[in-house]
Amino acid sequence: MTQEVGKAKREQIVQSVANHLVREGFTNSGIRALAVSAGLSDRMLMYYFETKEELIAEALALLTQNMAAALDQLLPERQTPAAEIVSTALASTQNPQLQASLRLWFEIVGLAVRGTEPYGQTAKQILQDWEDWIKRRLRSDQRHRAPEILAQVEGQLLLQLLRA
Amino acid sequence: MTQEVGKAKREQIVQSVANHLVREGFTNSGIRALAVSAGLSDRMLMYYFETKEELIAEALALLTQNMAAALDQLLPERQTPAAEIVSTALASTQNPQLQASLRLWFEIVGLAVRGTEPYGQTAKQILQDWEDWIKRRLRSDQRHRAPEILAQVEGQLLLQLLRA
DNA sequence: CGCGATACGTAGCAAGTGCTACACTTCGTA
DNA sequence: TACGAAGTGTAGCACTTGCTACGTATCGCG
């Protein structure tokens, strides 16, 4: 079971690993590369985390939170027409930081479709966050359109990233 | 450079590898596993193909063709309202064979967003095939909507596969 | 002081990766 | 029938993967 020791250090490591994942993606993210990014030895990584999967899961959870927060900053929470929600979401590819996160998102999707954890759960959570974000900006009588709008956003983002 | 020998055998190997990829995805698709699926030794795989990348690229090219053919069978080539195009495309997740191909597609996307070849080129090609498929079914005055419809389809497929 | 928990370095293992060296047979053709 | 190309088996290399064994330094606390 996971130890309760070195909480502050753990959190700092998780933050470093999250940054690494956004920058590099999942290729070249072995424990040695992650350890370098976090400024310690791979030996220490396995000291603070029982398995690599545990480490990745925590980093992804952190990124999920950050992503949700970034979304909220993107557009104030008020009644907004669907078209504006879509165009605002699409504009996020202009921001290099957000674009890197989106690349990572589609990598997670690629892993999640095979059902491998923790990617499946992470993907569902992120999708839910997107949908909630959209719902909070739609007029109440429009909320049922959220999934359709989400699909439009995801599809357009995919096209934008692949056609770059 | 690639040799011109054993063309028939090569094609049969490529077919086997393509089937393997659809079934298994890219994880557990090392040359040894691919060799077993193709019914020969990994040694022979490297005899017919200079690198693994060459083999994968050819298998993906074959799958791209097959996918385009499968799409054409899905809906006859005639003027069709956008909504029907979308719903027909979405119904493809009901067919297990097509669903497996779609999973692979999103895996390819995950690799392509980092620009790693041959996935980037393959992804662009498949996207183009989808778009052409849609265009051929739209009234001429509706063709400009093809990218938007494609986005809707891709987004809905993503949601369907992830929420399963 | 002494002792146990926390923290860390060095080295390495077992399995898997793409790929290769070398020896051998089988075969079509001249 | 001889000879070179095509085809194949056995073994292994160099490297990366996640993870571990073992020893030691440091620290708070009784």
Image: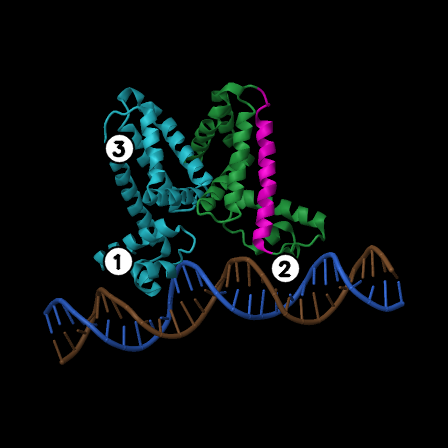
Chain colours: A cyan, B green, C brown, D blue
Closer to us: mark 3 or mark 2?
A: 3
Q: Position of residue B67 (x, y in %)?
A: 57, 35
The image quadrant that residue B98 belongs to is top right
* Residue that label 3 marks: A75
State the residue in front, B38 or B141. B141
Looking at the magenta stretch, what is its main secondary structure?
helix
* Residue that label 2 marks: B43
The stretch in magenta equals B51-78
Q: Residue at x 35, y 29 (%)?
A: A86
Are labels 3 and 1 on one chain? Answer: yes
Check disc 1 and report its element: helix, strand or loop.
Answer: loop
Quarter of the image with the N terminus of chain A is bottom left
Numbered circles on residues, count: 3
Among numbered discs 3 and 1, the one appearing first in the sequence: 1
> Would you call the spot at circle 3 few (<14 residues within 10 Å), some (14-19), or many (20 or more)?
some
Q: Position of residue A127 (x, y in %)?
A: 35, 36
Between the residue at mark 3 and the residue at mark 2, the CA separation in whole angstroms equals 56 Å
Are labels 3 and 2 on one chain? Answer: no
Instruction: Answer above or below: position of C1 versus C21.
Output: below
Closer to us: mark 3 or mark 1?
A: 3
* Residue that label 1 marks: A3
Quarter of the image with the C terminus of chain A is top left
Instruction: Answer above or below: position of C24 versus A160.
Output: below
